[in-house]
């Protein structure tokens, strides 16, 4: 990889001197640079070359990346888009948008405060799930990566200290969970330490004496370097960072905070909607969904208001499994029912399969109900749908179908795996994670469950509405917290008043929004755009509307901004109308 980067830099220098930069050269050079800067990306793509190191998160490295992104952006902007094909114009716009976004985030100081209870150095062990452990070299690279953890934690400490100095700090409610997360790592017996997990079952191809040497090295490394470094980082959080954290949950409380949130809202939604417009849209969606929820409550004959019905769903044992094992088997059963139904809705399906795994016990109490891990780009690892088995008594049965549709198929797995298989796209487009598209598609997919034969009983239909309401509520509470100065409790109360999710889920969700401003807006905004595009196509084409063709076109360019998606689908619709005539 380093040789490849050197080659591209040399090529760039020659081309720049000759004035012959091409878009493809810039795209290729930027991608090689991006992979060199982010060894974790290499790991998740299934490549081994970065498995011995972490991203350099020093202040100096971040400043250098800011300058280098500016250089790439300058070269991109020097190319006249009129000289490019329509596909290359989109490539140019998307790469430029990504570079501008990263540079703006740096200018606003966001990298100084991007740690929260769901994402940060306390979760570095999770990358082991994407790391191959097939031979001695794999284990040695993991040991090298572990040996580099103290440096990473020192860099994170320096970032947080700079954040204190520049008034770019997270709220206390987000950070106060992290010391306990670290204690679960350092307080465990070495063989229960999550960084040691790859050594519990080693390949038979590794000789027993070699395996024991590797295990011994790992135990010593964790005991003498990893755990002490984490303990020092935990002490820093408790003694220095937490006292400097802000009490107010919203990012708007920081100097220039409202401008930061306006940028984040635009960046995550890929629209020009203002926080005020998003807030009002959310309230309208909440009112609409409440009417549908009321109808189901009446259908099942429940005597009481919607709040009482939600409380009944949260507390009645009939809606919950008693053990994590039962819950996991039920998730497996739901997932097996999804795949055969996809042919009704899609002409093209991904080759890559997905599996179901439990969320690691160390992070389960502080994370959401489920999440998805994408497949390796080189085909060496399937996608995985991770489900939360912590406290099964708060994981309702009636939410399992809609959750599985969102995280697995036809939601995240189908969309992301298909994008990885689009051979005509440059690599950065295959890996594109435009949140409004990716999460908008997954939320839109939840309603496709009806066409897949799901939601057969009223409680499962209520579960689907609960999830739709969940994302509508996000528009209100995220803008409320970060732009209009809502308290954490006000946001929790609004969520509880309008959604049937359990209190444990609601608190985790609100704290997630507090720690990750703006991201929660993308789901509903993306879903509404896709639904509007489908409604326009159905009305225009009538009996000639083909849902499989619509979905194939929608997913056929990977994850793209919503304005580009509208242009793409308008072109498809025009072609369909001409064909029908």
Image: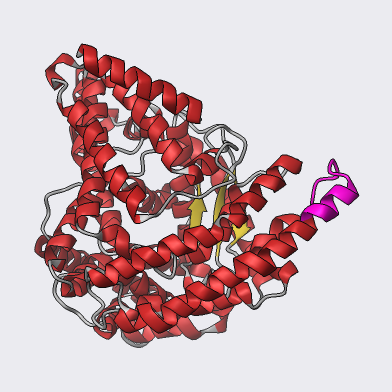
Front one among 227 and 565: 227
Tell whether 408 sits left or right of 137: left
Q: Quadrant of residue 58?
A: bottom left
Q: Residue at x 89, y 50 (%)?
A: 209
Please report the bounds of the magenta region as a residue range: 202-214
Residue 215: percent from left, percent from top: 78, 57
Q: Residue at x 64, y 78 (%)?
A: 187
Q: Tell me the quadrant of the picture where the C terminus can be found.
A: top left
Residue 48 appearing in the image: yes
Front one among 77 and 244: 244
Question: Magenta includes 421?
Answer: no
Q: Quadrant of residue 458?
A: bottom left
Tell whether 317 sits left or right of 520: right
Question: Magenta includes 207?
Answer: yes
The extreme right residue here reads 208
Residue 419: percent from left, percent from top: 42, 34
Q: Residue at x 18, y 62 (%)?
A: 261
Front one among 581 and 492: 492
Q: Residue at x 52, y 38 (%)?
A: 45
Task: Please determine whether, in this image, residue 348 is positioned above or below residue 114.
Answer: above
Q: Quadrant of residue 274?
A: bottom left
Task: Please determine whether, in this image, residue 2 is positioned above or below residue 579.
Answer: below
Task: Please determine whether, in this image, residue 433 is positioned above or below residue 181.
Answer: above
Residue 391 appearing in the image: no
Front one among 571 and 134: 134
Task: Please determine whether, in this image, residue 347 is positioned above or below residue 176.
Answer: above
Residue 66: percent from left, percent from top: 26, 45
């Amino acid at each position: 990889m380093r040789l490849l980067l050197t080659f591209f830099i040399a090529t760039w220098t020659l081309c720049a001197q000759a004035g012959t930069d091409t878009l493809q050269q810039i795209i290729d050079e930027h991608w090689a640079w991006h992979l060199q800067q982010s060894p974790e990306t290499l790991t998740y793509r299934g490549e081994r070359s970065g498995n011995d190191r972490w991203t350099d998160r020093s202040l100096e490295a971040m400043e250098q990346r800011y300058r280098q992104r500016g250089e790439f952006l300058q070269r991109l902007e020097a190319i006249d888009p009129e000289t490019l094909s329509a596909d290359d114009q989109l490539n140019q716009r998307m790469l430029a948008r990504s570079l501008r976004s990263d540079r703006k985030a740096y200018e606003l100081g966001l990298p100084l405060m991007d740690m929260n209870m769901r994402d940060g150095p306390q979760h570095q062990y999770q990358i082991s799930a994407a790391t191959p452990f097939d031979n001695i070299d794999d284990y040695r690279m993991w040991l090298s990566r572990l040996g580099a953890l103290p440096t990473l934690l020192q860099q994170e400490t320096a970032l947080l200290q700079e954040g204190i100095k520049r008034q770019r700090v997270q709220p206390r409610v987000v950070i106060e969970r992290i010391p306990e997360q670290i204690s679960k790592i350092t307080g465990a017996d070495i063989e229960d330490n999550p960084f040691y997990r790859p050594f519990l079952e080693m390949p038979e191809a590794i000789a027993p004496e070699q395996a024991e040497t590797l295990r011994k090295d790992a135990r010593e490394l964790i005991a003498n370097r990893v755990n002490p470094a984490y303990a020092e980082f935990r002490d820093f959080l408790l003694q220095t960072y937490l006292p400097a954290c802000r009490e107010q949950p919203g990012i708007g409380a920081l100097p220039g905070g409202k401008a930061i949130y306006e940028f984040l809202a635009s960046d995550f939604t890929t629209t020009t909607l203002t926080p005020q417009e998003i807030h009002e849209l959310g309230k309208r969606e909440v009112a609409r969904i409440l009417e549908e929820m009321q109808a189901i409550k009446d259908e099942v004959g429940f005597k009481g208001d919607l709040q009482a019905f939600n409380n009944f769903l949260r507390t009645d044992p009939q809606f919950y499994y008693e053990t994590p094992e039962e819950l996991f088997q039920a998730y497996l059963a739901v997932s097996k029912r999804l795949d055969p139904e996809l042919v009704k809705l899609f002409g093209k399906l991904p080759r890559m399969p997905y599996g179901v795994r439990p969320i690691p016990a160390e992070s389960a109490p502080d994370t959401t109900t489920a999440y998805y891990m994408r497949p390796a780009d080189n085909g060496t690892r399937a996608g995985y749908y991770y489900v939360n088995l912590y406290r099964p008594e708060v994981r309702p049965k009636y939410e399992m179908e809609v959750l599985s549709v969102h995280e697995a198929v036809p939601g995240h797995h189908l969309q992301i795996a298909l994008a990885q298989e689009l051979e005509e796209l440059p690599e950065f487009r295959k890996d594109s994670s435009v949140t409004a598209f990716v999460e908008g598609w997954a939320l839109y997919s939840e309603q496709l469950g009806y066409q897949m034969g799901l939601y057969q009983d009223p409680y499962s239909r209520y579960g689907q509405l609960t999830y739709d309401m969940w994302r509508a509520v996000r528009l209100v509470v995220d803008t409320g917290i970060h732009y209009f100065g809502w308290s954490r409790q006000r946001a929790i109360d609004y969520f509880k008043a309008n959604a049937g999710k359990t209190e444990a889920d609601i608190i985790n969700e609100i704290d997630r929004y507090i720690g990750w401003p703006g991201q929660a807006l993308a789901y509903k905004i993306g879903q509404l755009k896709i639904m509007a595009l489908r409604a326009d196509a159905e009305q225009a084409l009538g009996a000639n509307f083909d849902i499989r063709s619509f979905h194939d076109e929608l997913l056929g360019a990977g994850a793209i901004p919503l304005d580009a998606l509208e242009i793409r689908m308008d072109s498809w619709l025009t072609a369909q109308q001409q064909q029908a005539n």
